[in-house]
Amino acid sequence: MTKNKNYEYWNPTLSFRQKRHIRTHLEKSVEKKKYDASTVSELAQTILEKWCNGEIIDKTLDYQKILQELKIKDWKGKIAEREQRMAFRSGLASASVRLKPITINQIPENNENIRSPYDESNKRLQCIECGCLFGWKNQDEYFEKAGELKQHLMIKHDRQFNALEREVIDNLTYEGDST
């Protein structure tokens, strides 16, 4: 390269081919005077300068791809929720039925024995109607079991807690793991 740096060195000519539809779009834009350019070359030069100065930003967000990723997350969440439901239901179906001693809290006028759903000796809950057991291994499971008993009564026996069951559940405190 020569030591003489002339106009061509500092301002080189760029030449490139364009697709026909892009060329016609640029020509129409020049004719309608959308930009400050009188020829297609000046318009291309203006666009390139704006892009190099950061005034024209590349399209980086692909909204279809983002939407697809969100749908996949939604589907995974629904699948996980269904798996939890199925695990809960299979747990209800496979629960072993063991009878506990009857705890008589009060004797009503019609001489029916009322049983508590809490088995104090084994520290666990039990459905009075079918004998399904609800035990826990730690304090986190302890809080879940009252809700599971309520769901069990609603799903399998189509009823809410009676007064005694409600009182027992409300006054129940964690005393350790069930046996």
Image (cartoon, helix red, strand yellow):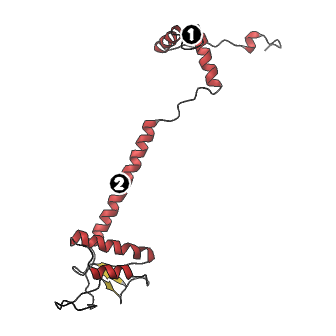
Q: Toward the viewer: 156 or 87?
A: 156
The residue depicted at 42 percent of the width and 36 percent of the height is 64
Question: Within 10 angstroms of label 1, few (less than 14), some, or many (20 or more) residues?
Answer: some
In this picture, residue 36 sits left or right of residue 90: right
Q: Toward the viewer: 102 or 40?
A: 102
State the mark number for residue 106: none
Give the amino acid type for the residue marked by disc 1 in the picture: Val
The picture places residue 135, in percent across and down from the top left corner, at 35, 79
The correct choice, above or below, for 142 with respect to 30 in the image is: below
Q: Distance between the residues labelled 1 and 2?
A: 54 Å
Question: Within 10 angstroms of label 2, few (less than 14), some, or many (20 or more) residues?
Answer: few
In the rendered view of the protein, which quadrant contains the N terminus? Answer: top right
CB contact under 8 Å: marks 1 and 2: no
The residue depicted at 82 percent of the width and 11 percent of the height is 4
Indicate the secondary structure of the residue bearing disc 1. helix
Give the amino acid type for the residue marked by disc 2 in the picture: Lys
State the mark number for residue 78: 2
Q: Which of marks 1 and 2 is nearer the N terminus?
A: 1
Whether residue 146 is visible here, answered yes or no, is yes
The residue depicted at 23 percent of the width and 92 percent of the height is 107
Q: Toward the viewer: 145 or 136?
A: 145
The picture places residue 112, in percent across and down from the top left corner, at 18, 89
Indicate the secondary structure of the residue bearing disc 2. helix
In this picture, residue 108 sits left or right of residue 165: left
Indicate the quadrant where residue 173 lies: bottom left
Badge 1 is on which residue? 40
The residue depicted at 65 percent of the width and 25 percent of the height is 53
Indicate the quadrant where residue 122 lies: bottom left
The picture places residue 140, in percent across and down from the top left corner, at 44, 73
The picture places residue 18, in percent across and down from the top left corner, at 52, 14
